[in-house]
Image (cartoon, rainbow, N blue to C red):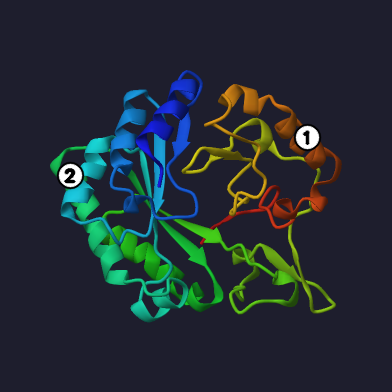
Amino acid sequence: MLAPETFTQMLSQLKDSLVYMLFYFQGEPYLNRQFLDLVKIAHQHKIYTATSTNAHYLDDATAKKTVESGLDRLIISIDGTSQSTYEQYRIGGSLQKVIDGTKNVVKWKKELNSSTPHIIFQFLVVKPNEQDIPDVFKLAKELGVDEVKLKTAQIYDYENGSPLIPDNPKYSRYKKLPTGFYSIKNKLLNQCWKMWHSCVITWDGRVVPCCFDKDATHQLGKLKQNSFRSIWMGEAYQTFRSKILKSRNEIDICTNCTEGTKVWAEE
């Protein structure tokens, strides 16, 4: 888990230019007991903060601390409005815990007269939960959630189809071809704004290009060994950027990427 000293080292180098910090990457942030303390530090430096959670750890005390931390945006993953639907994607998860955690945060926003965090229900649309889309908007309104966002799902090995690909094509990143196979909807253009805009720093200080590098296979540097500036301007980063501009489809993490496609769907 992200250690305070690693976070402090990163922040000391970036605080003067950093405007937006996402506190999540391939894991549940609330498992880190010091997570909200780090959010508070970032907030004190006037950095916009956001996180994404399964909401299973938002008990009353944690919900209060969440509001008090100054967290700006709280994304709550809710991928079904019945337990039977929810657990098809969130295996082992409890919809009731999601609802209870949401209620706790909404309550403490009111108690503390706070406009933050902005609470978003993120609904990842897959075939098993398509029918729940109208209900998630109703549930959000009942609970006092600020916004609902429908997100299209990234599917691995999508070429032969998948039981997760929605029936309604507007909720899918993929299209069925006349051959019966599937392809990603967007063209793989040799460009990516993220390479000059942001990056991911893992819990142990490794710098990787973006959130699609889920296993940190494209490590561009380590904060424990070099400064962020030297990594950002360094040879490894420049080489990776050049590869994208020349032939993006030759980079594994870039061939199933959302660059150029519609990630968010509308009801």
Tell which of 156 and 12 is nearer to you: 12
Amino acid found under the numbered disc labelled 1: Thr
Tell which of 213 and 118 is nearer to you: 213
Count how many numbered circles sit on residues in the image: 2
- The relative height of residue 107 versus residue 126 in the rendered view (above or below) is above
The answer to the question of whether label 1 and label 2 lie on touching residues, with beta carbons closer than 8 A, is no
Q: Quadrant of residue 240?
A: top right
Q: Tag 1: Cα neighbours inside 10 Å, few (<14), some, or many (≥20)?
A: few
Residue at 33%, 35% in the rendered image: 38
Q: Residue furthest front?
A: 225
Q: SS for tag 1?
A: helix
Q: Residue furthest left?
A: 111
**Residue under circle 1?**
239
Tell which of 64 and 200 is nearer to you: 200
Q: Residue furthest top?
A: 16
Q: SS for tag 2?
A: helix
Residue at 32%, 58% in the rendered image: 55
Q: Which comes sooner in the sequence, label 1 or label 2?
A: 2
**Residue 39 screen position, x and y as percent:** 34, 36
Can you tell which mark lies on residue 110? 2
Amino acid found under the numbered disc labelled 2: Lys
Q: Tag 2: Cα neighbours inside 10 Å, few (<14), some, or many (≥20)?
A: few
Can you tell which mark lies on residue 32? none
Q: Is residue 254 left or right of residue 135?
A: right
Residue 116 visible to an observer of this rendering? no
Q: Quadrant of residue 242?
A: top right
Q: Is residue 236 left or right of residue 106?
A: right
**Residue 156 screen position, x and y as percent:** 65, 67
**Camera-side mark, 1 or 2:** 1
What is the C-alpha distance between the residues marked 1 and 2?
50 Å
Residue at 20%, 56% in the rendered image: 59
